[in-house]
Amino acid sequence: MDKPSAPKIAAHTGCGIAPDNTLESFMEGIRLGADIVEVDLRVTKDGIIVLLHDDAPLLHECTYEQLNQPEIRVKVSPIYEKYEIVRLSDILQIAKQHEVKLNLDIKTPAAIEPAIQLVKQYQAEDQVFITGCSEGITSHHHDIQVVFNTPNEFTAEERNNYSLYAEKVCKEAVSGSYYGLNMNYETCRQEVVDLAHASGLAVWVYTVNDTDAMRRFVQIGVDVITTRAVTELAGLTR
């Protein structure tokens, strides 16, 4: 049996010392040598896509320029006393310079179209993967690579028969014209990897920080491992 090829490394936002979704954190992912760097996306009142995981009332009340004022942004999170709120447009420009791929984890449906338009504006279609909120993207934007977020939990039936789960998620991804499966690592087993690959789908797992778990997913042949421990995973795969 051939040895599986090494999976790509996706740096989870906040994979180093800097706080999640900051420019500094993004640059840490690049410096650590990740193949892909993940960021979370939301949208401001004036339609600017920003790096932010959690919703905040101020997002709906402020333009980007207002939101990024020091006295305002610190109300979103204390981390913004020292860091600015980052725009996706800035990240796309930097990614182009460094030739790193991006996982854009869209956190709200309102951010889908503005994010896609930015990707197209910067001609980054081949450089970007979309996860998170993705409804309608594969129907309306055939040039965008979307990775289907699979359910985090099994039904009672699926707990007793994993094949049902594997067949369901692969069927849904294929019928929806998705690039692959984005799976909580606790739901990913050899059977779904084999079925996905036979169906022409890639398999991504998140967020794997334990070395033994990393080894297991390397062995079963997943295509991408998202981790906060980039250096440790690189030591196993390179």
Image: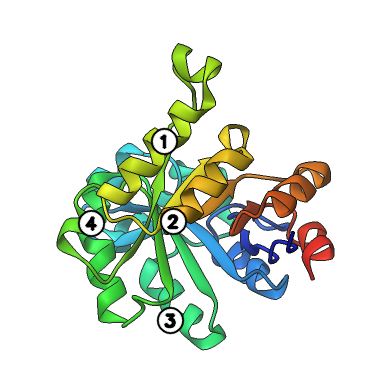
Residue bearing the label numbered 1 = 167
Q: Is residue 121 left or right of residue 180?
A: left
* Residue 112 locus on image (x, y percent): 25, 55
| Closer-to-camera residue (15/213) | 213
Mark 1 element type: helix
The crowding category of the residue bearing disc 4, from other C-alpha atoms within 10 Å (few below 14, some 14 to 19, many at least 20), is many
- The residue that mark 3 highlights is 93
Query: Which residue shows up at 26% across the image and 48% down it?
Result: 175
| Local SS, label 4 | helix
In this view, the residue in front, 232 or 219, is 219
Residue 155, x across and y down, in percent: 44, 17
Is any atom of residue 62 visible in this view? no
N-terminal label among 3 and 1: 3
Q: Is 187 in front, or is 68?
A: 187
Viewer-side residue, 55 vs 146: 146
At 54% from the left edge and 15% from the top edge, which residue is drawn? Answer: 160
Q: CA distance from mark 4 to mark 2?
A: 17 Å
Q: Earlier in the sequence, mark 4 or mark 1?
A: 4
Q: Is residue 125 above or below residue 56?
A: below
Disc 3 from disc 1: Cα separation: 39 Å
Q: Nearer the viewer, mark 3 or mark 2?
A: 2
Q: Residue at x 19, y 51 (%)?
A: 136
Point out the tag, 4 or 3, that comes first from the N-terminus.
Answer: 3
**Residue 122: which quarter of the image?**
bottom left
Mark closer to the observer (4, 2): 2
Single out the residue that lies furthest toward the front: 1
Residue bearing mark 2: 201
Q: What kind of element bears circle 2?
A: loop
Q: Are marks 4 and 3 in contact (CB under 8 Å)?
A: no
Q: Specify the amino acid type for callout 1.
A: Glu
Residue bearing mark 4:
137
Q: CA distance from mark 4 to mark 1?
A: 23 Å
